Amino acid sequence: MSKALERREKLREELILAAERSINAAGLAGLKTRELAREIGCANGAVYNLVADMDELILRVGSRTLARLDAALTAAESSGPASPAETLVRIAVAYCDFAADNTGLWRALFEHRMAPDKPVPEWAVDEQMALFRHIYRPLAALFPKRTAAELGVTARSLFSAVHGMVTLGLEQKLIAVPIAALRAEIALIVRAMVRGLEGELAKS
């Protein structure tokens, strides 16, 4: 790799890290190319020599966030012996904890919107979808007779329920919930959902 290319890659990494700090502190609304350029010591226009546009920059920050979330969920899964149902509880609580500890970056994953005619790059979609394996595996162990498609729908449904609770629980206005109470409620709801699924599927 040439020195010029090495410098570009280093500056690109610095740009992504600067954007990550900005999003974590002030959300997507606080992300300004002029301020990022000043922080990393380059011209404002040079930012777009490092990334194609702001969408790519935000997605690259999101990629780092997803990697850290993936690591947190993996750690929760491997923290000791547990039934598939309790593994799902651990994953859900770990998701809550990650969101509480990284609220700005976590919110940005869901707040960012591409233009209607601009699809999300395939690499970004793949990174997002890969995280569902944490939910899919224990569900497959719990419900071995379900098809892959059925398990996929259940995994997304379970995620949606937990994500909704976390989103509302971390809301800083009228409905904020203390984190300890939110963690307990999420564990309760996940256990209840699993028991409900087990009961309904036993009938079929």
Image (spheres, rainbow, N blue to C red):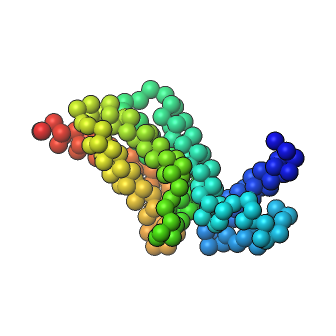
Residue at x 29% of width, y 33% of height: 142
**Is residue 135 depicted above or below 97 in this figure?**
above
- Which residue is at the front of the view, 58 or 69? 58
Residue 59 appears at what percent x and percent y? 59, 58
Where is residue 32, by image quadrant? Answer: bottom right
**Is residue 76 depicted above or below 48 in this figure?**
above
- Which residue is at the front of the view, 166 or 107? 107
The reply, left or right, for residue 17 in relation to residue 2 is left
- Image quadrant where one finds the N terminus: top right
Residue 103 appears at what percent x and percent y? 57, 59
Residue 124 visible? The answer is yes
The reply, left or right, for residue 134 in relation to residue 14 is left
Residue at x 33% of width, y 37% of height: 139
Residue at x 49% of width, y 61% of height: 119
Residue 190 appears at what percent x and percent y? 34, 46
Residue 190 visible? The answer is no
Residue 96 appears at what percent x and percent y? 49, 51
